[in-house]
Amino acid sequence: MTARDFAAGESIDVGAVVEVKTARETSTHFIGPKSGGLEVQIGKKEIVVITPQSPLGQNLMGKKVGDRWAA
């Protein structure tokens, strides 16, 4: 499965590459249908595969750029 191009304002869904910023760090995730936990190195960036069923995946699904949530 490859990452999909999302239009501005489109909700996060399977196939999205998402950058999550916290006060302490920034992490990049690919939301895939399976293989959660797999870590992929692309250049100098580490991308962790998560599924929509994972706790983080559940929080991200349906969100849009700039949305916030409490963990």
Image: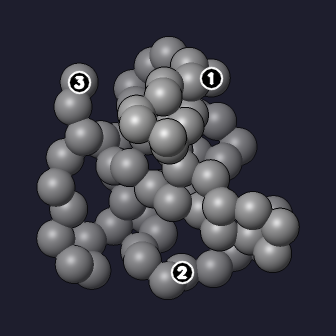
In the rendered structure, find residue 37 and report the number of the disc placed on it.
Answer: 1
**In this figure, which residue is indicated by the disc labeled 3?**
1
**In this figure, which residue is indicated by the disc labeled 2?**
67
Q: Amino acid at mark 2?
A: Asp
Residue in front for this viewpoint, 24 or 55: 24
Quadrant that contains the C terminus: bottom right
| Residue 3 image position (x, y, % from top left) | 24, 40
Name the residue: 40% across, 33% down: 42
Reply above or below: 38 against 50.
above
| Residue 30 image position (x, y, % from top left) | 43, 40
Residue in front for this viewpoint, 29 or 64: 29
| Residue 55 image position (x, y, % from top left) | 70, 43
Q: Amino acid at mark 1?
A: Gly
Name the residue: 16% across, 55% down: 5
Q: Is residue 40 rendered to the left or right of residue 37?
A: left
Quadrant that contains the N terminus: top left
Name the residue: 41% across, 37% down: 43
| Residue 44 image position (x, y, % from top left) | 49, 40
Q: Amino acid at mark 3?
A: Met
Q: Report helix, strand or loop for mark 1.
A: loop
The Cα atoms of the two marked residues, 1 and 3, are separated by 16 Å
Residue in front for this viewpoint, 28 or 63: 28
